[in-house]
Amino acid sequence: MGWFDSVEHNRWLSTQMQALITEAEGAIVPTGFAHLTNEGEPDPTRSIDLAVTARMLYIFSLGVLMGLPGTRRYADHALNSMSRYFRDPVNGGMWVSIKPEPDEEGRGVPWDEEGRVKSQYHMAYVILGLSAATVANRSGAHELLNEVLHDQERHWIEDNGLVRDQYDEAFENVVPVRTNGTLLHTAEAYLAAAEATTDPVWIERAEVMARFAHATASQHDWRLPEYYDGAWAPLNGEPEGLLDGRRVYHGFVTGHALQWTRIALQIRAGLRSLGRPQPEFLDELALELFERSRVDGWRRYEGEPGFATVIDASGNPVVGEDEHQQWVVCEGISATVALRRAHLDDGAQPGEVEHFEHCYRSFLDYVNDYLITQPGRWIRRLGPRNEQVVASKSSRWDVYHAVQAMLAVRVPLWPPYAAALSRGLLDKPEEAPSDKKSWNFFSRR
């Protein structure tokens, strides 16, 4: 019996997942969820980030759907924070970072001038979190999700079907940089929104984004550039003008390629649920990105396990960015599960997916042997030899990646995680049957 058929393996995954969700409770503050100190307490020197709070809404909504006691309160707190404190009452949209306490009138206060920026990267997580909260029937989630999706069409979606990255506070000036990270997270969020709203247009929009990723990666030896100009041409130098405080990478990000593997196959499964053809480029994109990332990134320093975070155009880890980050191996786990599941759903025999099963076991062993220090607490970053490094700023930021990695093998490729849980598909990973009753084909007419 393999791990994928083992009840005890699923119990191990469930134990780790529940511990991650419980540990995340410690990040709560009055206006949302905080970054943390090295001791695991909310850090008063750092802002309350919209993406962190939205990720918390997502994982606690998953907890609600799984029947984990206590998670409703935390999901509702995240939802209330986004509804009350992050919303810009003058210009619309949501600020990216605020102070941990509201003002005297009970309103959110931007952390600083950069906190007033409008960021699609952050809004992608808002959509993901609100979609899960809608499926979990949290009060007000559906209404706010519809408002946010309307803003997508008003401000963020470009004529080519891709998305802008950042604006100033008043939505007057667009930052002339586009990013792969924002694009892939938007595609993921749109898939979740498709099920939450029963509107397949969001799958169609995610497919457009995956088609761009395929066209671009195929021209770069299946490595995806991270930064683009306003016309979506890859940038050769540093991106200039980014305002939302995200890390700037100096090469090809292995974790983002691994995420596209999973997302491409989820798009494919979503199209299948609609009874529509599944374009061949989705299969090619998923497999080529996975194998390129595995060869480029896995065990690249003296045979030590772990994924190098950033790769150069020659396929070598970038010195200084070759650390082993928790979120990258989590996306490796989710990617290899998605590939195995997709092949089996297409009729592959068990022997034809042994490669993916081996990768899964290797990646999960790495998490167990190197990252988990106690239930719910995982090391965020190690050096290329898996040595301890000066700790990056602590956060519950990565819990979204980790929880999904612990759930990936336990649910089908479609529907997305929250909808799969709500439809009783936990521990039933065989592809869900086509169910067109969930789709509203008339909402766009």
Image (cartoon, rainbow, N blue to C red):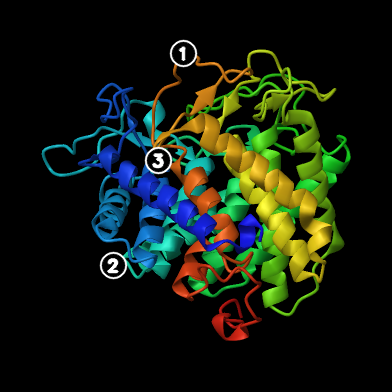
Q: List the single residue furthest toward the front.
A: 1
Question: Residue 320, position in %: x, y?
Answer: 63, 13
Disc 1 residue type (three-letter): Val
Question: Residue 256, position in %: x, y?
Answer: 66, 39
Question: Residue 278, position in %: x, y?
Answer: 79, 68
| Label 3 Cα crowd, 10 Å radius (few <14 / some 14-19 / many 20+) | many
Q: Residue at x 35, y 55 (%)?
A: 60
Using the image, tell me which numbered label, if any, was put on residue 139: 2
Residue hosting label 1? 390
Q: Residue at x 74, y 63 (%)?
A: 342
Q: Earlier in the sequence, mark 2 or mark 3?
A: 3
> Against 313, is 137 above or below?
below
Q: Nearer the viewer, residue 153 or 222?
A: 222
Q: Earlier in the sequence, mark 3 or mark 1?
A: 3
Disc 3 residue type (three-letter): Val
Q: Quadrant of residue 415?
A: bottom right
Residue 207 visible from this viewpoint: no
Q: Residue at x 83, y 64 (%)?
A: 279
Q: Is residue 134 left or right of residue 264?
A: left
**Element on which disc 1 rests:** loop
Q: Nearer the viewer, residue 415 or 426?
A: 426
| Label 2 Cα crowd, 10 Å radius (few <14 / some 14-19 / many 20+) | few
State how far apart marks 2 and 1 are (Cα): 42 Å
**Element on which disc 2 rests:** loop
